[in-house]
Amino acid sequence: MQFISDEKNRMIQIAQDLLVVNQLAPYPHFEEWEPAIYGALRTYSELSRPARISRIGVRYINRVVIPRAPVRLKDFFTVYPNLPQSLGDVHGPFMVRVEVPKLDHKVLITFGTAPAPSPSEVVQAFALDFYDIIQFESAIDDNIVKIQVEQAHENIVVAFEDSITDQLRSLFEPED
């Protein structure tokens, strides 16, 4: 596998029958880096001449740090572990994963604990991962790829917005 990096904090992974375009921090809006996906696909197609595409995936891995601990998950997230009352509501590290069908797409939502940025800080950190997968067989067609990538991005935006509460959203927004 080859890794290529550019000046815009993108990492492109290339292997036989594989092309991955990663946007690393700082994260611009999707519309700003979306053209890099299609540019990488054109270059990959010219060099490797693949006969078809069988899968497209769009993934966002969000690290969420809440500046206090402990937190009640339901105050910040709508997706979280729900334990029987007999076990209480205190638990340790966790991971929850669910697959949500969206037309011909599948959105995988994975939510779990993550290491705190620093052991001395009183914070809680979580990973909120959204991965939209489209399985299909198609000749490489720029219009089809663009439609599928944009739909995958929209599915993830909706899943993200519906997975967090206004209380968490307020942590992302600067105070006036």
Image: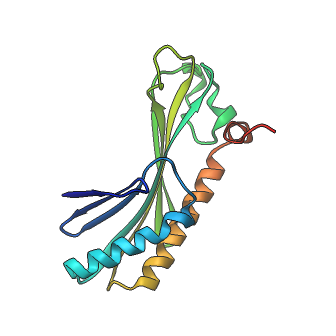
Say which quarter of the image contains residue 58: bottom left
Q: Is residue 136 above or below residue 107?
A: below
Q: Is residue 49 above or below residue 160?
A: below
The percent coordinates of residue 50 (x first, y second) are 23, 80
Q: Residue at x 34, y 83 (%)?
A: 140
Which of the pair 5/16 is nearer the observer?
A: 5
Outermost residue, front direction? 7
Which of the pair 79/69 is nearer the observer?
A: 69
Outermost residue, right direction? 176
Colouring convention used in this rendered image of the protein: rainbow
Q: Quadrant of the N terminus?
A: bottom left
Outermost residue, top direction? 120
Q: Residue at x 64, y 26 (%)?
A: 72
Q: Residue at x 47, y 71 (%)?
A: 35
Q: Residue at x 34, y 74 (%)?
A: 41
The percent coordinates of residue 90 (x first, y second) are 56, 19
Q: Quadrant of the C terminus?
A: top right
The percent coordinates of residue 64 (x first, y second) are 55, 36
- Residue 14 relative to residue 9: left or right: left
Total number of numbered labels? 0
The percent coordinates of residue 146 (x first, y second) are 47, 77
